[in-house]
Image (tube, coloured by chain):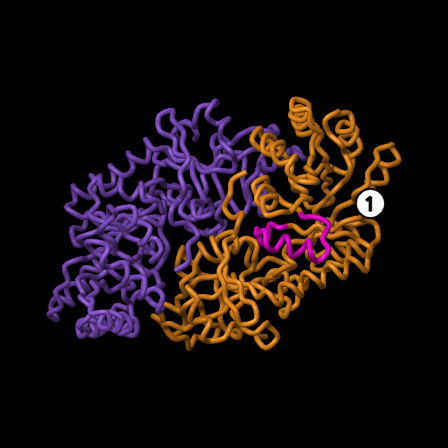
Chain colours: A purple, B orange
Amino acid sequence: MSAKLTPPVPEEIQAQLETPCIVIDLTQTRRNIIRLQEAANRAGCAVRPHIKTHKMGRFALMQIQAGAQGITCAKISEAEVMASAGVDDIFIAYPLVGAFRLRRAAALAPKVRRLILGVDSIEGAHALNQTAEDLGQTFEVRLEIDTGAKRTGVDYNEALHTAQAIEACRGLRLTGVYTFKSLVYQGKPTTDGAAAGREEGELLAEIAMRLRQAGIPITDISAGSTPTGIHVAETGLVTEIRPGTYIFNDYMLYKEGAADLEDIAAFLYVTVVSTPRKDYAVIDGGTKTFPMDIFLNTPPYFYLSYAMIDGRDDLVLTRLNEEHGMLTSLTGVTGLRIGQILRLIPIHICTALNLQNQVYLFDQGDLQTARIDARGMLA
Amino acid sequence: MSAKLTPPVPEEIQAQLETPCIVIDLTQTRRNIIRLQEAANRAGCAVRPHIKTHKMGRFALMQIQAGAQGITCAKISEAEVMASAGVDDIFIAYPLVGAFRLRRAAALAPKVRRLILGVDSIEGAHALNQTAEDLGQTFEVRLEIDTGAKRTGVDYNEALHTAQAIEACRGLRLTGVYTFKSLVYQGKPTTDGAAAGREEGELLAEIAMRLRQAGIPITDISAGSTPTGIHVAETGLVTEIRPGTYIFNDYMLYKEGAADLEDIAAFLYVTVVSTPRKDYAVIDGGTKTFPMDIFLNTPPYFYLSYAMIDGRDDLVLTRLNEEHGMLTSLTGVTGLRIGQILRLIPIHICTALNLQNQVYLFDQGDLQTARIDARGMLA
């Protein structure tokens, strides 16, 4: 397995790492950005990457330089950070609810060339419209549709009714629809990204057509995550995809069949601090370092471990305390030494980065540290 | 249930909150600090609170002012932050392994009155001793014993051998033993904190006695977490306890029978952003806001939800994405409104705080924000 992964940083550079830490391989990161962009270009589909994965201005600018038409954020705080980093086309793909969000969105809008806000309810639209009218502003909005993920988004049958209510708001300009469906195919979790992606694109395009037939000038049809993005783009039915995790990839995407091992560009380095028994060793990262946002032993993605251990398929990480990670051997003997540095691939890199203030950037022999600009923020 | 909780902040102050956010009730926090300290005083046992829960200098100083003899940290970065906040007696209850940790510990030692380092292996002791001798320093150390938690700590039968090896290090001064056992009783998880605490105290005291009989002048016997701390203190067998979570308490401690609802001093406030279906509503906090470091449906602590929803026992939080929390109704109807603010109690407040950059402090009508000084740091 390890043979197929990007090689770890050289020994002498490993010795400089203060663990537990995330090291991002910039060479592989650039490859991931370019490959996705080129595949979308071939499909004639725009890319608006979700920056929730990296939360860093430098990576958003790399994505735009590679051809992305703008970025996607989940939080107003992320959008503010990205705008101050120089990103001027931002879609907040999240229902803008709460007076503080409306106030901050109104303050951000004049600072960027294009700000698009998410709406998924008539109540939300009316509150947003009130803010717009109070300030004499107009907000560009997109209507979120639930195509099966069962989180935010209006139901298929509510879409037209809600869209018409938004159209009636003088302070809002409805230009698009968007959805997040990802690996849900015909209502069930799947690892078949192609089938799920086709369904995602077809469902959303069908709704866009109904709105257009009702006289609502929908121009932007936005769908697609990392597992489904390219498949959605290849349907030719959408105008934009919003993948996020593809920039680094992780253990989850590998288990889902959505990334190869060699595509992984971000790693967690840890130090073995204790070897009290033959069958387990303790590393200096626990639940404050490794995300747990996956259910172990859950089909269709079967996880035996909260991380993949580079070169050690015989070790699993299932028992964690806050700063202790118990690496357990499936053979009964870890063979690990105190002070040994290990490289792990966390299940979910987006939530792993959110646990750190900074990352190491490794670029062809050069190691630097960088702050994670938008991590841990409210709103 | 809600009737027994500390009242939420008043409506007009709730309107100032930017959610998702943690609000700490300082009145209840002070009560928690004082109650634990007084109980330990009655038992004639010192308190060295673990600051991993709050990671804030101001709370460490409150604990010391209430009578704590010093603090406990898990990381060198936490110790550095606490020292710069004015704390001068610090125990890093974690194996100090890795050149960067030794270097930073050596730099910190001269800045505080007392720095105690954790050791749980001969290899670790030798590396620490080498650093001490290279710098002409002496480190005060404590030997960690595994009394059943199966993480760091030497085995009962290795304790004397390892202690003698530490004694032989001219750069190290072995003054104590410590353990973390918490809710493990006779090898099994339990909710009987009293039984587990007695066992924890008895096992550690027995080892301390063996070391003393071998001529090793152990003065400090340190054990006890929030669920077991007072019970350990009441054995009269230990000199110090190290509870951490007691300062705020959480859903986990309540389910474990280690805290009452009225003892909870930290809450997560969220906003309902979407009500797409009758049976669930979406709040603005997901896996980047709510810790998941508990296994759902795991005996002996049965969790139905990643958080307790104040006043709404009919709602559970089990389905989460990064910024979406799907609050699901057990009756089929949530009755929640878009824009509604809810108060939740997360399963684990230590990891919940680690997810935020700042908290709100509520003190008898006054609301302020404060940075979480040591959150998200490496090493």
Along the horizontal axis of the image, is A159 left or right of B101?
A: left
Depth check, front residue: A175 or A301: A175
Q: Chain of mark 1?
A: B
Which quadrant holds the N terminus of chain A?
top left
Rendered location of residue B91, percent (x, y)? 68, 42
Q: Which residue lies under the disc numbered 1? A: B205
Residue A289 seen in the current view: yes
* Residue at left offset 72%, top offset 41%: B146
The answer to whether residue B268 is magenta is no
- Residues in magenta, as a range: B51-71
Instruction: State yes or no: residue B62 in magenta.
Output: yes
The C terminus of chain A, quarter of image: bottom left
Left or right side of B238 for A68: left
Is residue A228 visible in this depiction of the protein? Answer: no
Q: Which one is nearer the viewer's eye here, B221 or B82?
A: B82
Q: Residue at x 82, y 45 (%)?
A: B205
Relative to B37, residue A257 above or below = above
In the image, B347 versus B99, the foreground residue is B99
B112 or B295, nearer to the observer = B112
- At 23% from the left edge and 69% from the top edge, which residue is drawn? A135
Tell me which amino acid carries mark 1: Ala
Residue B167 falls in image quadrant: top right
Q: Residue A26: x, y in percent?
A: 34, 33
Please state the horizontal and vertical placement of residue B195, each as a whole percent of the image.
77, 57
Which residue lies most toward the right here?
B213
